[in-house]
Amino acid sequence: MNLDSISFYFFAALAVISAILVVTRRNAVHSAIFLVTALLATAGIFLQLHAEFLFIVQVILYVGGIMVLFIFVIMLVNLDVAARQMQFNRMWLVALSLTVALGAQVYMVFHYAHSGVMEALFRLPAAPAAALEPNAEAVGISLFTEYMLPFEVASVLLLVAMIGAVVMAKRKV
Amino acid sequence: MLSITHYLVLSLALFTIGVVGVVTRRNVIIILMSIELILNAVNINLVAFSRLFGSVGGQVFAIFIITDAAAEAAVGLGIIIAFFRNRETVLADEMDLLKW
């Protein structure tokens, strides 16, 4: 049990427990706080995978940006009424069957991984961490050469989302 | 020793919790939070395979997914505010204006 495994299991347990709490809490503010914990635990997984740039992006953008947006909206809409009403609809059977289907699919993948053509993929030794170092530089070079067009499309998407959000939240169009 | 399977199982767990949240919760804000959980599970997969193959493409796509999540959260929360202003509710099963 080396440090790598310990940090993975710690962050994985933190992420799963806080994700369950996000889905089950009655108060939306509590859900938002546990979502912060889950996102930070995911950031820890990224750091453990030697993706330092993505770790920083996750902390700044998700935990710093998107969560503030969520808290703002929770404060804007009056949730006192909603908190006293029934929190779950009667779709638990659908949810259960979806869970079983997803679990069965991944079990099939693992089952065939140890006997079929995918064995090579799962046995592949992990590339040395040095292949992705220095991380921010590697990601930046890839983003601005190989993935130039998707990068520009993403900027247009953000512009559209910004205009859309302003139009949606305006009182009178 | 850690293998890609560990990350796939973690990702599956987070994805499934998110799907259960989307299907069973009535509060639209918590449904949006569950969608964020689902997107995060996908990101874990992408970064784990990026590490496995020593290629940076997976991390670049994870950045694009984070961008999409930001856009989706902005527009989604804008819709929630607009809807709350008109109907005074945030419960998904009371949003039935288009239902005949």
Image (cartoon, coloured by chain):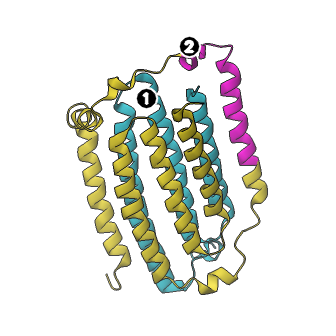
**Where does residue B45 sit, x and y in percent of width and height?**
51, 37
At x 24%, y 39%, the residue is A149
At x 46%, y 25%, the residue is B52
Q: Nearer the viewer, residue B35 or A67?
A: A67
Q: Nearer the viewer, residue A173 or A131?
A: A131
**Where does residue B54 sit, x and y in percent of width and height?**
39, 24
The residue labelled by disc 1 is: B51
Q: Chain of mark 1?
A: B
- Note whether B35 is above or below A82 in the view shown: above
Q: Provide the secondary structure element on which disc 1 rests.
A: helix
Q: Provide the secondary structure element on which disc 2 rests.
A: helix
Q: Are marks 1 and 2 on the same chain?
A: no
Residue B59: quarter of image: top left
- Note whether A114 is above or below A15 in the view shown: above
Which residue is most to the right?
A: A93
The residue labelled by disc 2 is: A120
Q: Which residues are magenta?
A: A97-123
Q: Is B69 contained in the magenta span?
A: no
Q: Nearer the viewer, residue A139 or B33?
A: A139
* Disc 1 packing (10 Å; few <14; some 14–19; many ≥20): many
Give the residue type that dot 2 points to. Answer: Ala
Q: Main secondary structure of the magenta part?
A: helix
For chain A, give the colour.
yellow
Q: Quadrant of the N terminus of chain B?
A: top right
Rendered cyan, the chain in question is: B
